[in-house]
Image (tube, rainbow, N blue to C red):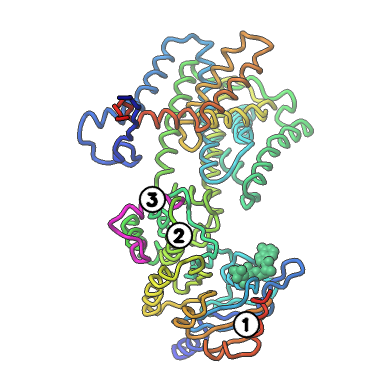
Amino acid sequence: MEHRKERIDRGIKARTEDIYALFSYREMLYLLVPRAIPILVLFAVTLVVGVYWQKVLISTAVFALLALSWDLLTAAGMVSLGQALFFGVGAYLTGILNHYFKLSPLFTIPIATLGGGVVCTLLLLPVLRLRGIYFAMVTLALPLMLVRIIEATKIFGGTEGLSGLSGLPSTRFELYLSIIAVLAVLFFFRRLINTDYGLVLRGIRDNDRSVMRSGINIYWYKAQALFMASAVGAFAGALMTHVYMFVGMPVFEMDYSILPIASAVVGGMGTFAGPMLGAFILVPLSEALRGVGGLRIVIYGLFLVIFTVALPEGIFHYFQRKYHQFERWVKVEK
Amino acid sequence: MKVGTTRNREEVPFLKVTNLTKQFGGVRAVDTVSFDLNKGEILGVIGPNGSGKTTLVNLITGFVKPDAGKVFYQGKDITGMMPHRIADLGIARAFQMVKPFYQLPAFKNLIIPLFSPRVKRLAGGKYGDRDAIAIDLLEEVGFERDSFVPFKMASVLPHGYLKRMELALCLALRPELIILDELFSGLSMAEVASMLPIIEKLMSENLTIIMIEHRLRELFRISNRVIVLNYGKKIAEGLPKEVMESEEVKKAYLGSETE
Ligand SMILES: Nc1ncnc2c1ncn2[C@@H]1O[C@H](COP(=O)(O)OP(=O)(O)OP(=O)(O)O)[C@@H](O)[C@H]1O
Ligand SMILES: [Mg+2]
């Protein structure tokens, strides 16, 4: 007599993303627990940590927003290597409105969010026809070009940037605003991608010519996805600007492009929850490693490699799969 | 005035292709091809490999822009329009190389055309229960309704089902003209036999069809008229029987077979 581990998937119903009638508390809990626990833990953490880690959490949420934005673009077949573009445009817009027009953050943040969406969409409109790596190269180049333009023309404070901008009421306010934004975007994107509208976006990634022959204008859909993604990125930039009370050329830095992608890869692309989870692992980790000194980047890089090699599907996919399976030992006749 | 418009409608062919030409590098893939197509007609297009059949379809459906020539659809010049605009006018095409959405379940594939502005317009602004319509459409092209097949990922479906789905993707658009680019290629005799009645049913619904096919026997059974391409040129046109008796056609086919 030997033992073998048997693995069983739970019923389809429990695993679907659609809303359906819930028949028992058990089913409700089954769905609620994995959603509620992380949120509760997150809020619990915000209550106990000091100001320093509150700031880290804000910056984590900002990267999570960029990662969510990246994941939406990817879902619609657009690979972005330039999340810094969205971040930077939002940051500069809010800075300009606050510095030159003296608008309060109450107005600058929403205007920069929508305006950033519009500006970035218009900037990328001419290259919406490009696919895959060609589109990616343009997104990579744009933020780098904008930095040089600001440097060369000395507009918006040039290399100095704009300082002395309005701050937000308190660190706690910043923290909750950013976390609520992340959760709202997460919820919205996860919903959206499972609607028929989202199906068209996924269809474009799968086979854009087949979407065209279906009488659907793929450029219109891509532009809309781009607007949503860049507005989310611009919001992140605008928020961060008021947190730092400063905007300058660093907002176009590669960090804002690369870290969201790393978060998505580590966390699990295509799920939105994955990239968010990835950001909540990588950003605090990077902070925690500050104490290590010179070897920080090496350890960080090692961590990334181990994660991607051990769980190539992403952490979220892994946990999701495990959660939906029972495992038990069964006897096997030899 | 009223008389004028009705007469006009009778005179304008459903689809009119004039002197369509496309050159790829040194190759004239399609070379001054002209033909007319009437409503309800089934036009067969044959020709050896590489004779420009698929390119002709790409030119009509807007996926490739012609170097010269015009395409008129119901009297409207559609030359060089974007593919989705042409599809919106009611021209659906099945690709020779199947293009399903591999990462979606079979029935969800059909949601995409069912979600198009055209379908919404034709349904009077409402879409209806798209999932149910999708399953009905799949059944129409031969998916077994009471099985798991419509719910399987397109990526795991066998070739035969993907070919059927190409047809369903066209039908979902509620088209007036369907262009089928080698719908039967890679199918077994039995599969073709089971698909023929589906095409015949579409014929009885007065749908206009352009059918590209290498299987001449099946094609001749359903088409009213056939045109023959060779090296991008139209070398013959007429009833299936007439066309096969033309010396030039025999030469083109024999030539390609001895290669
Ligand atoms: N996008 C393209 N770029 C370059 N050459 C092309 C392109 N598309 C087609 N051709 C060339 O045009 C010619 C006609 O090709 P086409 O695919 O239209 O032939 P076909 O009649 O559909 O052939 P088959 O029976 O094999 O499907 C071929 O010589 C082909 O190599
Ligand atoms: Mg072909």
Q: Nearer the viewer, residue B2 or B16?
A: B16
Between discs 3 and 1, the one toward the N terminus: 1
Note whether ligand 2 is within 8 Å of mark 3: no
Q: Which residue is denoted by mark 3 in the rendering?
A: B152
Q: Is residue A201 magenta?
A: no
Give how far apart the Cα atoms at labels 3 and 2 are.
12 Å
Secondary structure type for disc 1: strand
Magenta-drawn segment: B138-155
The residue beneath circle 1 is B34
Q: Residues within 10 Å of mark 3 (few under 14, many from 20)?
A: some
| Chain of residue at mark 3 | B
Image coords of residue A219 (percent x, y)? 56, 53
Question: What percent of the width, then of the height, locates residue B165?
Answer: 43, 61
Residue farthest to the front?
Answer: A334
Residue A114 x/y as whole percent? 53, 39
Q: Regarding ligand 2, which quadrant of the image does it lie in?
A: bottom right
SS class, disc 2: helix
Tell whether circle 1 marks a residue whose Cβ is less than 8 angstroms from ligand 1: no
- Vertical side of B143 occupied by A39: above or below: above
Would you say residue B140 sits in the magenta stretch? yes
Residue toward you, A230 or B103: B103
Q: Which residue is mark 2?
A: B162
* Residue at 72%, 27% in the rendered image: A157
Mark before the other along the chain sequence, 1 or 2 = 1
Three-letter amino acid code at disc 1? Ser
Q: Nearer the viewer, residue B57 or A101?
A: B57
